[in-house]
Structure formats: structure tokens, C-alpha cells
Image: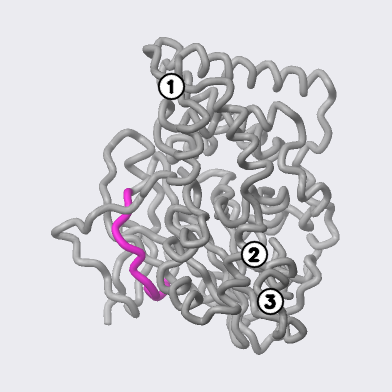
Amino acid sequence: MSDHHEAPPNPYLKKRRDSRETENLTKRVQKIEQLLIDKGVVSKEALDRIVEIYETDIGPMNGSKVVAKAWTDEDYKQRLMTDATKAIAELGFSGLQGEHMVVVENTSSVHNIVVCTLCSCYPWPVLGLPPKWYKEAPYRSRVVIEPREVLKEFGTNIPSTKEVRVWDSSAEIRYMVLPQQPNHAKEMSEEELAKIVTRDSMIGVETL
Amino acid sequence: MNGVHDLGGLQCFGKIDKKGEDVKFVDDWERRLFASTLCSFGALGPIDAFRHAIEKMDPVHYLSSSYYEHWLEAVEARIKELNFTKADIGVPLTPTDIESIVATGALYSREVVPGIDPIEVGREVRALPYSPEGHTRLPNYIKGKKGTVTELRGTFVFPDTLAHGLGECEQPLYSVRFSSKELWTGRDPANDAVHIDLWHSYLEVCDV
């Protein structure tokens, strides 16, 4: 256990903004928005639609359906492991930040975990927008050098006999973890299974 | 360029902070900026130019500001770089256009390039100590390290040239496995590993 584990989360990050800062940031964004509208890049309605799509239509419930289907349909699982982009599109999920998908399977000997150390690449079509911690320095920096310590902070202990495999999303390939199906869920239907699959299990910071 | 965005392997950022993890947008300006940024990619150039604009941020500001402040800095920088305020007026994207962009995304893979023999799966490779002036997706913690090619991902556009308007320079992209033992000398040699996607230009084949 090294000293930094007692340190507060990213001491460098300014957590609170005063209202004047927020006002200033708001004005800068309004200027960009107005410029894009004035230059005929986009309509106001289209901007609203983007927000709506990512706040309501796309999220980890998509990935859960992929996992539940893979657990209950061996043929589908094979297709998913061979060409994830195509197999995920079968369920209607595709596009931005998921153009080149790879699914990595947790087994009795390997536990997978996904990160983007250089920015915050994340498989949007199946998981939606990333949780805050995924985009922040502590996770991005530490998970490649001390994945087991990071996992412990999520309450996840991986036995030393198992390999922890970290996937750093440095290119345009986007990764999703296929978690192991828990024993207590062997008899569940596909719909029931989809409900027990969590976002964190598909990033790989949690087991089910 | 080497910079503070390249966080992989640092240990100075403390614990993972899970507070507010599900909050997609802390302030409304983040929501608006998210939408504006997404639809400006056509007008403001490739995603790697945007990433590079973030990399060029003042390092203290980068570490002390939030994710969407990075986006804001980058969009403003790109508007300035491209002198976008002087651009012609185009045909604005509609909500329907947006839906189709979200569902299709942008393909980064290309046809195989004649004249480049891809490195065979199973070969041992070394990541070059490559530190170009501009944008690159080869993280510091990988440079100079030995790994094994585990997968040929296909032929992909090359971010290092794309970000600077120097063409796509498409080339083979590989998934390369680096053992934790190789990456982090002096740490507990668990049987863990990092798998990362690297372009042909980042690698040299080790002598047999």
C-alpha cells in the first residue's frame, strides 16, 4: 500500500466554481452556439436533439441488452466475439464512438477492465456518456499501473490467480467487457438478466 | 507532443472520486457545449485535431479544470485556428441529420495499403521512443517497451498526420500486449497486462 492512497481525490482539480465563473463559462458557450447557428452549421432544434439523445435514448441499458443476449444465446455470443460492431448493431445500437467495437470476455482466468489514459474514449452506443470518474485523472493514470488497487476502491477483489487485463483505448477501437454471468442468475430470462447487468461491470470495475 | 494529458502510470492523483458519478452535465453550459462540439466536428476538422487542441492547453489549467472545460478550450482554439468566423454560411444540420450522424458515426478504417506488410500476430515488437512535435496516440508509459502483437485490427487512419491536415496516412493498427512486469519494473510482478492499440509507425519488430 503506497502513501498516495490516503490522498484526497485529485488534489489539483478545482471542485467548486463560483457563480461568476459559471456565468463566464456560460457566455463562452453561448458565443460558440450562436456562431455555429449563424454560420449555418447546425439548427437550434438539432442541438436540442443531440442533448435529448444522450440524456435519454442512449445509456448502459443498451449494453445490458447485449450482455444478456450473449449469456442466453451462444450463437449470438460467437458473433459478438467475432465482430462486435456488427453483432451490437443487430440490437439496433451503433454509431458515434462505437464505430469499431471489440467485446472482451471475463473468464475464470482473466478479468478485463477498460480505460483511455490519453483522453476519455468510451463506447457511447452501448454505455452512453462515461461516469465522471472515468474522465478524471485518478482513474486514467492509475488503472494501468495498479489496476488491483483501483479495483479495490470499487469494492472489487480479483484473486491473484486471475490475470487482470487492462485495455487502453488509444485508437478508435472501443471496448466493452462481457462480464461473467453470476451463478444465482443462471435460470433468469434474457429480460431479467438485462436488469442485473451494471454499467460498471461492462467497464470492468465491478463483477456481478 | 509529451504533455500532462498523457496520464497513464502516474500515481499522484489520489483516490477515485465516485461522487456525482452519474451526473452527465454539472451545469447547463456543459450540456450546450456537448451538443455544439458534436455537431462542429464536420466544420472544425477531425477529432484528432480537437484532441490535439486539448493537449496544447496550459498544463496547470488542464489538471485543475473539468472535462468539459477542456472541450471548451479546444473548440475555441479550433475556431481561432481555422479562422472560422470568416467561414462561408453552410446548410444547417437538422434533427434528422443529427439522428443519422449519431447512428452511423465516422468510419476510421480504410482499405489495405499495398506496400506495407503487416506485422504477424505473435511477433515481439518494441514501441519506439517516438515523441513527435504534434499529436500522437502513443502514450509515454509504452514507449521503449517490448510487447507482443495479439491482433491485427485492420487498416486505420493515422492520428499523428490527420490532426495536422497532413493526410490520413492509413496503416495497419495492432492490439499489442505488454506485461505489467515489462511496463512497471520494481512493482509486484503479478501476471497482469495492458493491451493497447498501436499503429504500424509506432513499432519495430524485435530480432528473432
Front tag of 3 and 2: 3
Indicate the amino acid at tag 3.
Answer: Ser
Front tag of 2 and 1: 2
Please tell me if label 1 and label 3 are on a single chain.
Answer: no
Indicate the amino acid at tag 1.
Answer: Glu
Indicate the amino acid at tag 2.
Answer: Ser
SS category of the residue bearing label 3: loop
**Magenta segment: does it hold A76?**
no
Front tag of 1 and 3: 3
Q: Residue at x 83, y 50 (%)?
A: B19
Separation (CA) of disc 3 from disc 2? 13 Å
SS category of the residue bearing label 1: helix
SS category of the residue bearing label 2: helix
Mark 2 = which residue?
A: A64
Mark 1 = which residue?
A: B81
Q: Position of residue B86 (x, y in %)?
A: 41, 10
Majority secondary structure of the magenta segment? strand
Q: Position of residue B126 (x, y in %)?
A: 37, 68
